[in-house]
Image (tube, rainbow, N blue to C red):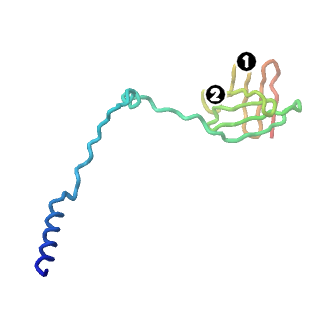
Amino acid sequence: MKKTLPLTAVAALFALAACNSKPAAPEVVDSNPDPMANQLANAAPVELPPSIKSEQTMRCKDNSLAYVTFFQGGKQAVVRLKEGGPATTLKAAAEGEPLVADGGWSMTGTEKSIELTQPGKPGQTCHT
């Protein structure tokens, strides 16, 4: 019995020594390669849309309301003439230039005061 215990321990150590303690890296086989991988890798970076900077309700000179959403970067704003009404997106090529939209829309100013020109109407000042 006394000789069997050390022999069993030695046999167990030999068995563990025969095991590879560092297994080889698994082989990854891509059976379904991405057909657009090269196009995506070479694509130009995507510019995210601007985030909302603030939303203002403004009282205009003719006592009407304008609901204006200003976006980061100063190159885009959304104007609504009725709360929840149709939106008009005004854009500028660069920050500081007048924001314009098709049909004769134009807007200049800041989040506190704007000069708004609507189609078929003269420009008017609106403020918070």
Q: Does dot 1 land on a helix, a strand or a loop?
A: loop
> Which quadrant of the structure image shows residue 12?
bottom left
The disc, 1 or 2, on the residue closer to the chain's N-terminal end is: 2
The vertical placement of 41 against 103, above or below, is below
36 or 109: nearer the eye? 36
Q: Residues within 10 Å of mark 2 (few under 14, many from 20)?
A: some
The vertical placement of 6 against 73, above or below, is below
Q: Please state, as top left, top right, bottom left or bottom right, where the N terminus lies in the image.
A: bottom left
The vertical placement of 3 against 95, above or below, is below
x and y percentages locating residue 54 in the rendered image:
70, 41
Q: Residues within 10 Å of mark 1 (few under 14, many from 20)?
A: few
Q: Nearer the viewer, mark 1 or mark 2?
A: 1
Q: Does dot 2 land on a helix, a strand or a loop?
A: loop
125 or 88: nearer the eye? 88
> Which quadrant of the structure image shows residue 64?
top right
Q: Which mark is residue 64?
A: none
95 or 54: nearer the eye? 54
x and y percentages locating residue 86 in the rendered image:
76, 27
Residue extending farthest bottom: 2
Amino acid carrying mark 2 in the image: Ala
- Check disc 1 and report the residue beneath it: 103
Which residue is located at x 82 percent, y 28 percent?
A: 124
Which residue is located at x 37 percent, y 30 percent?
A: 34
x and y percentages locating residue 75 in the rendered image:
63, 32
Q: Which mark is residue 92?
A: 2
